[in-house]
Amino acid sequence: KKNPTRAILFLLTVGVFFTALVWQKRTPVSLKIHSSFPLSYTSTAGLTKEGNVFSSIDPKRQLLFTFEFKGAKVKSVRKFSNLAVSGLAKGAGSFWSTDAAGGYIYRHNIDADYSISQTYGNADQSPSAIFWDGKYLWVSDLRTETIYQYSVTGSLVPTKQYTLPGIV
């Protein structure tokens, strides 16, 4: 007698193999790098873009690098006033940074030392990644595992929040 279970397993194996083969042909394995240039630091706490100008923080030395991507020219290197930067964004006429350990979001003036113009804190939160979408400020929180959407008026007002699914 032939074993029907064995035949089904064989057909399933062949089907999975061909599916993987077809999928590999459809999906590119490598990404093309259009352009790149080396940075003079080993870690970064954020990257912003405005036009052709990028800004990035070296959190170890607390320096804000501003550079033009075209031609890989560093425009400026200046001290940044947040001593524990975990995230960086630019929007609403300011730089924004987070301090995950302290539970703070800072709004910085665009001046010689990027002085802090406003401090928003909550000891129960740990804001880390931060992003400006042109209208709202988005902040992820490590402690609450939540992403917050803030309206930037005179103060920072949470308008929405999304709880992230847990990773087990």
Image (cartoon, rainbow, N blue to C red):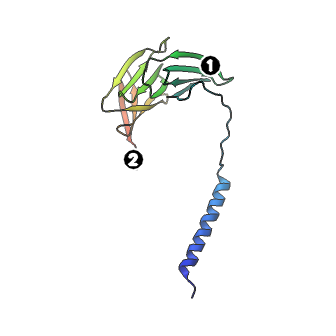
Residue at 39% x, 31% y is 127
Among numbered discs 1 and 2, the one appearing first in the sequence: 1
144 relative to 47, above or below: below
**Residue 55 in sight here:** yes
Total numbered labels: 2
In depth, the one of 138 and 113 nearer the eye is 113
Q: Position of residue 117 (x, y in %)?
A: 40, 15
Q: Is residue 166 left or right of residue 42?
A: left
Q: Position of residue 78 (x, y in %)?
A: 53, 15
117 relative to 87, above or below: above
Q: Is residue 77 left or right of residue 136?
A: right
Instruction: Give the amino acid at mark 1.
Output: Val
Q: Position of residue 167 (x, y in %)?
A: 41, 48
The disc at residue 138 is: none
11 relative to 72, above or below: below
- SS assignment at label 2: loop
Instruction: Give the amino acid at mark 2.
Output: Gly
In depth, the one of 149 and 8 nearer the eye is 8
The disc at residue 166 is: 2
Dot 1 crowding, Cα within 10 Å, few <14, some 14–19, many 20+: some
Image quarter for residue 161? Answer: top left
Dot 2 crowding, Cα within 10 Å, few <14, some 14–19, many 20+: few
Image quarter for residue 21? Answer: bottom right
| Direction top: furthest residue | 112
The disc at residue 74 is: 1
Q: Is residue 45 left or right of residue 163?
A: right
Q: Quadrant of the N terminus?
A: bottom right
- SS assignment at label 1: strand
Q: Position of residue 48 (x, y in %)?
A: 54, 26
Q: Is residue 102 left or right of residue 16?
A: left
In depth, the one of 31 and 133 nearer the eye is 31
26 relative to 136, above or below: below
